[in-house]
């Protein structure tokens, strides 16, 4: 699980970048059990169990207390992050957008749990094995999508726009795009290509939501790597060997928010601190991973943002 990222690396939901999707689902399961008013994902726990990593399954089910492995900041972060993207999609589709695109969908279950307006098409893109696994696991649970779900098995480093169009996506119609928890796992040039492609495929009135991390100040990346190494050691001591620092691309990159603004998107931005405060949750302590300053951004192409 410790190989360094490269342009053609592969993974499943128990290894490398894929395991981060399972960790995120584990946090959603714990967050749902803790307070379902902000995030209610009934599929997170059974999907984690289906992946088959025993420690994660026990954490997701509540059999194992989260302790240091999934701390309060991670659980509260899962609550506000989940609510941010849920609200984004519901606002967009209730405003008349009928195409939703979830990039690197992992174990995301929004196509099955959100009350989508009639006529909404939800496109989910991820590695073919990940898409096939989730589709099969949810079918075995007896779950049915609450929208017209179109699962697109494709690597985002390949020609995913062609695969998306083949699944029925219409670039002449507005769409709502989500790149949740994705950009930090892309090389800087790959991030720019992804945001450029989203823009090229978006009709006026389309919407986008993602995260934008400020570029590091001197010493920031050293502290972030040290924090990730500490987290990796905690998991390793419990038998789950995942080197978190090696999964990310570090160094200077274009910040997503101004990059999108330069391409015609009008954005609103909220820091993690903003979202925690708005939802009545405690502020972050320590913040060795620089999560407090992470911006959650959403906006519209060629339109004035709401105040």
Image (spheres, rainbow, N blue to C red):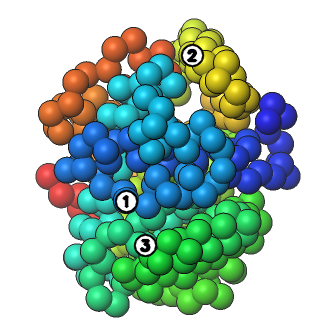
Q: Quadrant of the N terminus?
A: top right
Of 138 and 96, nearer the camera is 138
- The residue positioned 29% from the left and 51% from the top of the image is 39
Q: Secondary structure at mark 1?
A: loop
Dot 3 corresponds to which residue? 111
Q: Contact (CB < 8 A) between labels 1 and 3?
A: no
Task: Give x and y (percent) for residue 26.
Answer: 49, 44
Q: Secondary structure at mark 3?
A: helix
Task: Give x and y (percent) for residue 134.
Answer: 60, 67
Task: Work out whether 148 lies above or below 128.
Answer: below
Q: Secondary structure at mark 2?
A: helix
Q: Is residue 69 left or right of residue 303?
A: right
- The residue positioned 29% from the left and 88% from the top of the image is 118
Task: Compute the Cα span from label 2 to label 1.
Answer: 30 Å
Q: Contact (CB < 8 A) between labels 2 and 1?
A: no
Upstream in sequence: badge 2 or badge 1: 1
Dot 1 corresponds to which residue? 42
Task: Work out whether 253 lies above or below 118.
Answer: above
Upstream in sequence: badge 1 or badge 3: 1
Dot 2 corresponds to which residue? 227
């Amino acid at each position: 699980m410790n190989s360094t990222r490269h342009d053609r690396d592969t993974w499943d939901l128990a290894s490398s970048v894929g395991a981060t999707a399972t960790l995120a689902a584990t946090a959603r399961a714990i967050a749902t059990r803790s307070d379902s008013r902000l995030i209610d994902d009934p599929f997170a726990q059974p999907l984690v169990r289906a992946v088959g990593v025993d420690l994660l399954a026990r954490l997701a089910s509540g059999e194992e207390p989260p302790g240091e492995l999934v701390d309060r900041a991670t659980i509260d972060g899962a609550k506000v992050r989940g609510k941010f993207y849920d609200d984004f999609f519901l606002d967009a589709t209730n405003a008349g957008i009928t195409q939703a695109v979830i990039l690197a969908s992992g174990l995301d279950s929004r196509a099955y749990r959100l009350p989508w307006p009639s006529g909404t098409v939800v496109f989910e893109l991820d590695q073919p094995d990940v898409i096939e696994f989730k589709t099969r696991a949810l079918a075995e649970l007896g779950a049915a999508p609450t929208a017209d779900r179109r699962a697109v098995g494709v690597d985002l480093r390949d020609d995913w726009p062609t695969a998306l169009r083949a699944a029925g996506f219409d670039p002449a119609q507005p769409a709502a795009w989500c790149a949740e928890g994705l950009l930090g796992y892309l090389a800087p040039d790959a991030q720019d290509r992804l945001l450029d492609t989203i823009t090229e495929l978006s009709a006026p009135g389309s919407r986008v939501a993602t995260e934008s991390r400020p570029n590091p100040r001197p010493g920031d990346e050293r502290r972030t790597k040290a924090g990730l190494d500490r987290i990796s050691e905690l998991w390793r001591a419990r038998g789950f060997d995942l080197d978190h620092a090696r999964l990310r691309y570090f160094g200077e990159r274009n910040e997503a928010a101004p990059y999108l603004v330069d391409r015609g998107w009008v954005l609103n931005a909220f820091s993690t601190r903003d979202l925690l405060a708005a939802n009545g949750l405690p502020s972050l302590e320590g913040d060795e991973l620089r999560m407090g300053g992470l911006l959650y951004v959403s906006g519209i192409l060629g339109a004035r943002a709401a105040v």
